[in-house]
Image (tube, grey):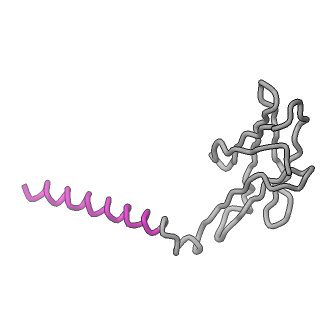
């Protein structure tokens, strides 16, 4: 069991960010390991936040992870080998069957039809 709890704060511009908090008073800096396909990810930054017992975590998504398929990143406490959190990127052909992709496509088509209908109504007046 890990002494740390991880909360996602945002995922923006290719960097996943989170806040690590310790359940143990005066805990040392956490050792975090991030893996993708069982290989370690480099460039992970852990920075202490003012107030003590809290650290900002930044995980840059490497370019080779962006592409067709499902990419799952595991965030581990390296000392206890405990899973703290994970995040997944889904892109390409795999996404075609996802209902969210279908809804997005339907919304885009509906917006296109609304614009065409409004243009038609303006032209026939």
Give coordinates of residue 26: x percent, y percent.
89, 30
Asked which quadrant contains residue 110, the reply is: bottom left
In the image: residue 17, left or right of residue 38: left
Which sits in the foreground, 68 or 83?
83
Above or below — where is 13 with respect to 54? Answer: below
Asked which quadrant contains residue 81, the reply is: bottom right
Which sits in the foreground, 48 or 54?
54
Give coordinates of residue 98: x percent, y percent.
52, 70
Give coordinates of residue 31: x percent, y percent.
89, 45
Q: Residue at x 72, y 63 (%)?
A: 72
Q: How many numbered marks appear?
A: 0
Above or below — where is 82 with respect to 99? Answer: above
Q: Residue at x 25, y 59 (%)?
A: 114
Q: Which residues are magenta?
A: 102-125
Name the quarter where the C terminus is drawn.
bottom left
In the image: residue 59, left or right of residue 103: right
Which residue lies most toward the top here?
Answer: 51
Q: Residue at x 24, y 61 (%)?
A: 116
In the image, residue 121 lies in the stretch drawn in magenta: yes
Above or below — where is 42 with respect to 27? Answer: below
Which residue lies most toward the left here?
Answer: 125
Q: Residue at x 59, y 70 (%)?
A: 92
Q: Main secondary structure of the magenta part?
A: helix
In the image, residue 105 lies in the stretch drawn in magenta: yes
Give coordinates of residue 1: x percent, y percent.
86, 51
């Amino acid at each position: 069991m890990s002494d740390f709890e991880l909360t996602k704060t945002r995922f923006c511009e290719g960097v996943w960010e989170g806040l690590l908090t310790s359940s143990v008073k005066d805990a040392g800096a956490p050792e975090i390991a991030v893996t993708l396909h069982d290989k370690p990810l480099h460039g992970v930054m852990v920075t202490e936040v003012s107030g003590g017992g809290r650290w900002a975590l930044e995980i840059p998504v490497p370019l080779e992870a962006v592409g067709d398929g499902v990419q799952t990143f595991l965030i581990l406490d390296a000392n206890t080998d405990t899973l703290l959190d994970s995040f997944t990127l889904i892109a390409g052909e795999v996404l075609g069957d996802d209902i969210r992709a279908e809804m997005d496509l339907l919304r885009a088509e509906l917006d296109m039809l609304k614009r065409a209908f409004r243009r038609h109504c303006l032209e026939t007046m």
